[in-house]
Image: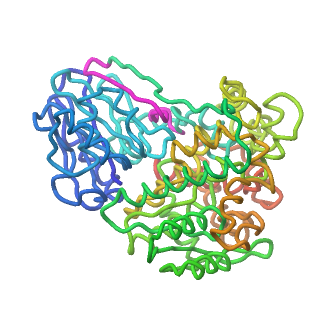
Amino acid sequence: MCGIAGELRLDDQPAQLDNVKKMLPALKRRGPDFAATYRQGALALAHSRLAIIDLSAAANQPLADVSGNWVIVFNGTVYNYRELRQRLSQRGHAFLSHSDTEVILVAFKEWGEDCVLHLDGMFAFAIWQVDSQTLFLARDRLGIKPLYFSLNAHHFRFASNMQALLAAGEVDKQIDPVALHYQLTLHAVVPAPNTILQGIRKLEPATWLRINTRGQQQQQRYWQLWAERPLVHYNEHDWRALLHQSLSEAVKKRMLAADVPVGVLLSGGLDSSLLVGLLAEAGTKNVHTFSIGFENQPEEEGNEFKYSDWVAQHFATQHQKYLIPNDAVLKRLPEAVAAMAEPMVGQDAVAFYLLSEQVAQNVKVVLSGQGADEVFAGYFWYPQMHHAQGDVLQRFAPYYFDRPHGEFLQTVMPHYHGDDHSSVLVQQRLTESHADRFLDQVLRFDVTTLIVDDPVKRVDNMTMAWGLEARVPFLDTALVELAASMPPELKLKQQGKYPLKALARGLIPDAVIDRPKAYFPVPALKYVRGEFLSFMRDILNSRACRQRGLWQADYIERLLAAPEQYMTALQGSKLWHTALLELWLQTHVD
């Protein structure tokens, strides 16, 4: 929906608007409709708006209450803002706009930090309280909207992306060794609070942070996901009925919370097709759907148009599809990397970037099927983990880690060597309480941590790069909580995602439900050859790469000599992973 930024001085100096103005250009693509700044004492704020709800100037930000004592900048959408507005009005509060932004601000005035408990949506926001000279920041439960910050003795700064903080300057750009281990082991997942740079952190999902002008901080997690069976026994029919109701409601509220048209990113897979089916079931007409495809490789098809065409024809959607040739992928790849707040190796990052460019010319908001595989156990590695033997790490690492710790030590220079940080993280997260079974622990870890800093982050970055807001019904809080309570065996039936498949019967064509599991491929980034190999060789042999001293030369030489022999457990290219990180550093840090 928007880009937010701010600076709070901690050294008794007044805030400088110039510092937040430096951040605005890096936020403009997230919010191309309007931009403004605010300054009061030690605080300066900046906001770049994508107008979705209440398109009038009354909803522009930074937005202050009537008294001027509270000021907010907000990125995201609150789906229950109408209900909250009515409740708050009954408590005597007046409103000057029809925006969800003002509802958050008034909710904070009424409930303080507990306002987040009342918000149903995706959000990252900051509220300045003038009388107490205190800044309050919060992030949604599943981390759908990002919030980065930097801190030193002089100031606390925050923004929707790392590019904005880097533009403001005074950031420690050294590589964080712990984050580097995550980056190269968890296929570019760097869980909060870490980022690849030592000087930039990110607020964890479901967390709020309060900081005052003396630098005193308070931080609290306000929500946790439990993965335990309910006290009431449900059979398959019961689960299907509960799922139908919950997912239908998740889709409905994401369609209604907008004063602009809403489309659907239609891959042709089960998840996005089911969203279209539920819209049709609800009576929604003239749905706009969009698909993208790429050139085939001998090993893999580069598009799923056959399936998306079936769905579009079946529901008579207003459908558009785009076929991207390989030369266009390579030409536009640096643009996609420039839009990445953090280095992202997922093939679909560039796909979402190129698709969003086209979609944004037609609509401002789209629904995406992202998250369904993690919530309902749709990937091939979940059954592998489920049937594996040993402790939690032995059951998880072989099927997920991109490289074991020994290979990590061969990949990077000794300066970056240290403990097996990824294994420590996994061991910790998979032994936390309130999860009945091992797969419950895995799926909870995936949904609350891994997905946040991989596919969810990719979708946010690549869509917002074109002023397009993506909404993810499968990551609706109530739906996620329901799914977490389902027995693992139910999710794993019929090669995974059985509850969704059962729900889809009769709603969408059976051929889409029964098709083999596919991904969102850009084959040229998986089977690296030709111009793509030359492109990556140039990056890794560049002077900037050598001067950085990050990579072990003999390891890089092995990857370049036989790139298709070095694939991860999840079938990603290790060469692409290293080249992408190096290109990101050259683009954003050097």
Whether 80 is drawn above or below 393: the answer is below
The stretch drawn in magenta includes residue 407: no
Magenta segment, which residues?
Answer: 196-215
The residue lying toward the viewer, choosing from 287 and 524, is 287
Whether 70 is drawn above or below 335: the answer is above
**For the N terminus, which image quadrant?**
bottom left
Left or right position of 568 against 458: right
Name the residue furthest left: 67
Whether 151 is drawn above or below 258: the answer is above
Name the spot of residue 192 as percent of width and height, x first: 53, 34
Left or right position of 188 against 169: right
Q: Quadrant of residue 314?
A: bottom right
The residue lying toward the viewer, choosing from 333 and 562, is 333
The stretch drawn in magenta includes residue 211: yes
Name the spot of residue 579 as percent of width and height, x first: 63, 55
Q: Is residue 562 visible?
A: yes
Residue, x 50% and y 30% (percent of image)?
223
Q: Quadrant of residue 271?
A: bottom right
Name the residue furthest right: 389
Provide the major secondary structure of the magenta segment: loop
Question: How many numbered callouts?
Answer: 0
Q: Is residue 554 visible?
A: no
Residue, x 15% and y 29% (percent of image)?
41
Name the spot of residue 273 as percent of width and height, x first: 60, 68
Left or right position of 107 against 492: left
Q: Quadrant of residue 548?
A: top right
Name the spot of residue 171 as percent of width and height, x first: 40, 36
Q: How is the image coloured?
A: rainbow
The residue lying toward the viewer, choosing from 445 and 310, is 310
